Amino acid sequence: MKYSDELKVGLALVVAALVFVLGLRYFQDLPLFETTDSYYSLVENAAGITSGSPVRVNGVSVGAVRRVGYDADERQVRVDFYVEQRIRITEGSSASITGFSAIGDVKLDLSLGPADNERIPRGGLVPSHEEDFFGDIADRAPALVNRADSLMIGMTSTMSSVSRLLEEPDSDFRKTLQSVERTSDQVNRVLREEQQRLAATLDSVAHLTGSLNRIAEGSEDEIEATLQDVQHLIKRLDSNLDSVERSTDRLDNILEQIESGEGTLGLLVNDPQLYHRMDSTVVRLHELIDDFQQNPRRYLKELKLIDIF
Amino acid sequence: MLERHILGPIEALGQYVLLLSKAFRSLGEFGIYQKNLFQQMVRIGIDSIPIVALAGLFSGAVLTVQTAYQLESPFIPQSIIGSIVVPSMVLELGAVVTGFILAGRVGARIAAELGTMRVTEQIDALEAMGLNSIGYLIVPRVMAGILMFPVLYITATGVGIGGGVGVAHYGGFLSAGEFVAGARQFFSPFDPIFGLIKSFVFGFIITSVACYKGYYTGGGAEGVGRSTTEAAVLSCVYILFANLALAVLIL
């Protein structure tokens, strides 16, 4: 089918115009087909807001700034902006410019009034309230600078006295530092010497271990046999010790009996009478033997052993 | 020497301005050029849409890739790519790329057409028949250029931004959402209007220079070739000058 030139041209122009308008609205963050209401606000300072800056309610973009200009009558900056029609801008709403122009993130923030209030008519004035962030900083700046200044002065005097201390050749600080240095030198020296000695000791220990190892490796069997013998010996010693223990027990018993005066030995030990009697007996026996030696006839007369003669 | 280098160009300028003033005087005679106008609008405008769209697509895509390559820094948010590519396309590339392509495609064609008509004495024949040859031949071409060039500019810019978003999104540079967010952050509604003004001016320059060169062709087939080349080259040069002048005067 052949279209007329007029139709093609007309269609191209309409499509282009549509694309242009919709593209413009799209990149301005405006709704493509919804209608918008326009309002204006008067502010002291434009603070970097330009046409195309977003208009936001609670952080959501709902429109765009249309135009920013100076109102010579009001002696204020007049900001015209579009807002989607569904947003009810009621009495008590206010607008403020937020963000930093250095980051290119300036926007017009609307805070809506109560929903019951009457709607501000289209093209009406939305009062502004300034959120002067930088103004606050600027107000506080002098005090801050003064404090920073005094701080700097104090730091300077401290630093100068420290440096004076360091510079004086016979200040305490310097002496202390020197003695600390000497001490650390000595410690270092001692450590170095000890290090050598320690190394020598460790060397000899290593040497010893080595030779021990060598010996052990050569005569493992003998050592084992010896150890077995030793074990055997210990066993026997153990049994001997058992019998010794038993003997000691019995000796203990005997000694106890003796102590308590039982048996002959006990009596002998414990009864002095018996001793005395034995003593006297022995004395008399002695006299008797003496008498026998001096006068054997007295006793041999009666002896009939020699009756044969 | 003096005649050739100073008086010559001034004379040419005068001739050009006189031709255009005659053309504007015959603007009212709509009946003469009405049929020709729509024909020219189709030839200059509609028939150029594919090549212009192709050029826009590729310039947008290349611009995105190269901006992403240049801005590879952890301190710069990726969305900045969008805020560089979109204004670049809208302000500069959409209009200038279209202008250069049409200087070759349209300017050369108009100059060759009119030049051939001149050397084969068709223009004289028109005049002899009592027809206003300027109104009949030049006005519809210049009008078509002025009217259709913005359409081509919008095509190139739209397709170019689309190409940029596509390459950014599917090439893994940044998501389409980030791209659009970045573009919106620094978007000024005046930018596309400035681009539109540029495209009107470029359209006028290309078609009027080509018509002038073609209408005053002399010297047979060789003359037609020379005026065709001159039309294309001079349109490009004047587009560059006009681009700078507009940027300085309007922005």
Image (cartoon, coloured by chain):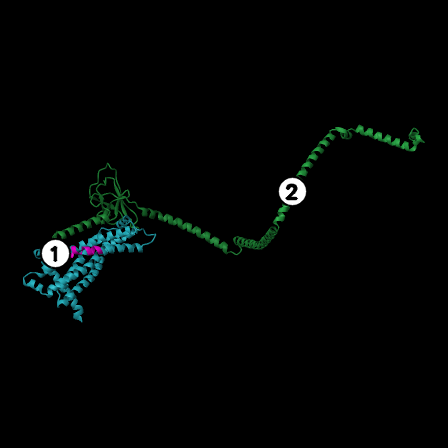
Front-lying residue, A117 or B169? B169
Q: Is residue B158 left or right of residue A148?
A: left
Disc 1 crowd rating (10 Å Cα; few below 14, some 14-19, many 20+) is some
In cyan, which chain? B
Q: CA distance from mark 1 to mark 2?
A: 131 Å
Main secondary structure along the magenta-highlighted residues: helix
Residue farthest to the bottom, as pictured: B1
Figure check: A241 above or below B30: above
Q: Quadrant of residue A34?
A: top left
What residue sits right under mark 2 in the picture? A232
Image quarter in which the N terminus of chain B is found: bottom left
Q: Is residue A30 magenta?
A: no
Q: Is residue B159 left or right of residue A186?
A: left
Front-lying residue, B68 or A142? B68
What residue sits right under mark 1 in the picture? B39
**Does dot 2 land on a helix, a strand or a loop?**
helix
